[in-house]
Amino acid sequence: MLKTHLLEKNEYEDLIRQCWSSDDELLEKYHVEAGRGIEKCIESTIKALDENVDKNTFKLFKITKEQDLFGFYGTEKVSIGNFLTTFFVMPKYRNKENLQEYMSLIRNNFDDDFYASIYEKNMRADKFLIKNGGKKIVKLNLIALDRYNKR
């Protein structure tokens, strides 16, 4: 069973580093700073979280499975509604059963439909969200905006 742990801002960087150090493919192909190393990817993400999220509503959740790090996700309320700001699953947990439970956990966090933005080159995340019920509704430069129906 997956468990959710709400993090404090000073815990974000360590969690992201621990997760992303397990995923060379993310760092080399899919992150907006892909190919520039883990430190640049983390720096860019922390800066985006500092500058671009709604500080009153943003929450970052660490996810564990039987005391083991499973991944994370972040949410916020924005002008268009509920927003999945960021998400990650450790590679060893990327199987159908775990990913279905993970998406249920995320869906249960929201009281209505929600949106997510994915950098266009992050085809892996885009495919994952569409496979799990997402519908691409708008493209803005490098960001694809998707809407998800709660199941």
Image (spheres, helix red, strand yellow):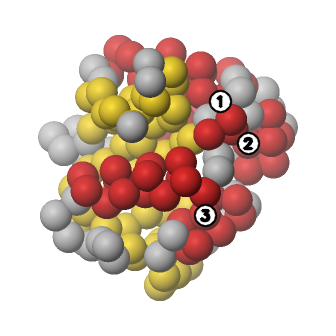
Residue occupied by mark 1: 20
Q: Distance between the residues labelled 3 and 2?
A: 14 Å
> Label 1 crowding class (10 Å Cα cut-off): few <14, some 14-19, many 20+?
many
Residue 50: horizontal and vertical position, in percent? 38, 33
For residue 124, which quarter of the picture? bottom right
User: For the residue marked with disc 2, what is the amino acid?
Assistant: Leu
| Residue designated by label 3 | 128
Which amino acid type is marked by label 1?
Trp
Horizontal and vertical percent position of residue 121: 73, 61
The quadrant in which residue 104 appears is bottom left
Classify mark 2: helix, strand or loop: helix
Instruction: Give the amino acid type for the residue marked by disc 3 in the picture.
Output: Phe
The reply, left or right, for residue 38 in relation to residue 52 is: right
Which of disc 3 and disc 1 is earlier in sequence? 1
Question: Is disc 1 in contact with disc 2, using a CB cutoff of under 8 Å?
Answer: yes
* Callout in the foreground (1, 3): 3
Cα separation between marks 1 and 2 = 7 Å
C-alpha span from label 1 to label 3: 17 Å
Residue underneath mark 2:
26
| Left or right of residue 58: residue 11 | right
User: For the point 35% across and 53% down, which residue is it?
Assistant: 106
Residue appearing at x 41%, y 32% in the figure: 63
Crowding around mark 3 (Cα neighbors within 10 Å: few <14, some 14 to 19, many 20+) is: few
Q: Given contact means CB atoms under 8 Å apart, are the residues at marks 3 and 2 in contact?
A: no
Q: Which of the 4 image quadrants contains residue 18?
A: top right
Q: How crowded is mark 2: few (under 14 residues within 10 Å), some or many (20 or more)?
A: many
Whether residue 129 is visible here, answered yes or no, is yes
